[in-house]
Image (cartoon, rainbow, N blue to C red):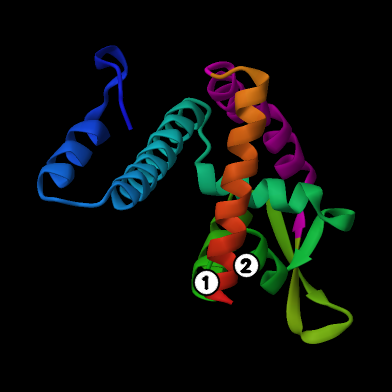
Amino acid sequence: MAVTTSSRDAVDDLIEAVRKAGAAERTLRAKALAYRLRRVAHQLELEMRRELAGHGVELWELEVLAALKRAPERRLTAGQLMTAVALTSGSVTHRITRLQDRGWVRRDPDPADGRSVLVSLTEAGWQRAVEVFDVKTKVEEEIGDVLDDDAVDVLNDALRRISHHLNARSS
């Protein structure tokens, strides 16, 4: 797990301390991967939030708008939306209310199930989503540009396998 001096980061320093404490190489590799995944995810979220804030949109708002934009007829039940954006029912209800207040979504009774509500993307919500999707895409492309295409493919495959493993554990 040799690292050149010019490419060292804070995780390398942390791993070096763990190495000095006697951790096995397998443990060191796993810890380095886990720390970097968390740090990169955090850095990416901060960057997306920063870019979107300049356009008056929060990341969670864009994620909800995107889920509705992809949905058939641009609508989902509150439960489907909860699953699509990985939120609790209380959180999704609060967020739907905030988006409804902005005029970006509306709630309608589900004709197929009177206990359920359909959340629909309004025209204003569609327009706002389209306006700011490019901001998010630009940040994502900048990340992809750091690596060559083959490295992006390998990394995507590796992260997909990790995601499947973690999803299987939580099922």
Which residue occupies the foreground of this view, 93 or 108?
93
- Mark 2 near mark 1, Cβ–Cβ under 8 Å? yes
Decide: few, some or many residues near mark 1? Use Cα within 10 Å; few <14, some 14-19, many ≥20. Answer: few
Q: Is residue 120 left or right of residue 7?
A: right
Q: Residue at x 56, y 19 (%)?
A: 147
Residue 166 seen in the figure: yes
Which residue occupies the foreground of this view, 106 or 63?
63
For the magenta stretch, what is the residue range?
A: 120-146
The tag earlier along the polypeptide, 2 or 1, is: 2
Spot occupied by residue 31 in the image (x, y as percentages of width and height): 31, 49
Which residue occupies the foreground of this view, 94 or 72?
72
Which image quarter: residue 119? bottom right
Q: Is residue 38 left or right of residue 122?
A: left
Decide: few, some or many residues near mark 2? Use Cα within 10 Å; few <14, some 14-19, many ≥20. Answer: some
C-alpha separation, residue under disc 2 versus residue under disc 1: 6 Å
Spot occupied by residue 26 in the image (x, y as percentages of width and height): 34, 50
Report if residue 89 lies within the magenta region. no
Would you place residue 78 above or below residue 150 in this image? below
Q: Which residue is mark 2?
A: 82
- Give SS at disc 2: helix
Q: Main secondary structure of the magenta part?
A: helix
- Give SS at disc 1: loop
Residue 88 bears which disc, if any? 1
